[in-house]
Image: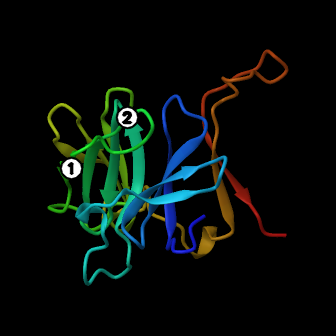
Amino acid sequence: MDKKSGFLNGVAAIPHRSDAVLVADSANGLVGRLDLASGKFDTLAFVFPQMVPVKGAGLPIGVNGIQIHDGYLYFDNSFEVAVYRIPITPAGYPVKGAKPELFVNLSTGLTFLDDFALDTKGNLYGASNFDNSVVFVNDATRKWKIVAGGVGEMTVAGRGRRDRDVVYVSTGGALAKAVNDTKTEGAKVVAIDTRP
């Protein structure tokens, strides 16, 4: 990795490539392209003002979560509370001359956006840690709403003193490979107490 890297955070696999991934550097406000064979981290791959940490923010975090969907790199800026997208080439670089476009601005109701996921239709689900919320953004309309939790709720609140030694694991119900070639179940979240 590049010695100048700050806080490496989100990682996205480039579709149909096994030799490189894109990596968000939240502190330096960029997305680099990591060549998995050589270890070269190209920090000039994606450098845009929309990725830079917001001045005066409590933490020096800009770009955070990244995902690739339907020929676009989607990325969020945590304290800007916004998600952008930019078209990319099959090799995992920005299309020449392309600039990030605003996908959605969530700052009218949230104070922070951490990571997010996109479903097969391009709808977005995002975690707002400081707001104890999960948000949904409709790809077609770009309208959003909180679908779980809320500022005054504990539904999806982060860890506290009681669960700081717990590791949470989401399962796939053995759908990829059935247990004993016969058993599957619905997906679940398992809490593992790591205390001795």
Q: Quadrant of the N terminus?
A: bottom right
Q: Is residue 98 above or below residue 48?
A: above
Task: State the image quarter where residue 17 is shown.
Answer: top right
Q: Report the residue marked by disc 1.
A: 99
Q: Report the residue marked by disc 2.
A: 69
Q: Can residue 116 be seen from the camera position used here?
A: no
Task: State the image quarter where residue 136 is shown.
Answer: top left
Q: Is residue 108 left or right of residue 58?
A: left
**Mark 2 and mark 1: Cα distance apart in space:** 17 Å
Near-viewer residue (175 or 3): 3
Secondary structure at badge 2 equals strand
Residue 5 image point, x, y percent: 51, 71
Q: Residue at x 63, y 71 (%)?
A: 164
Residue type highlighted by circle 2: His
Q: Is residue 37 left or right of residue 41?
A: right
Q: Can residue 188 be seen from the camera position used here?
A: yes
Q: Is residue 159 above or below residue 105?
A: below
Q: Residue at x 41, y 54 (%)?
A: 65
Secondary structure at badge 1 equals loop
- Mark 2 or mark 1: name the one nearer the start of the chain: 2
Residue 116 image point, x, y percent: 39, 49
Q: Residue at x 32, y 41 (%)?
A: 124
Q: Residue at x 85, y 70 (%)?
A: 196
Task: State the image quarter where residue 95 is shown.
Answer: top left
Near-viewer residue (89 or 164): 89
Q: Is disc 2 surrounded by few (<14), some (14 to 19) or many (20+) residues within 10 Å? A: some
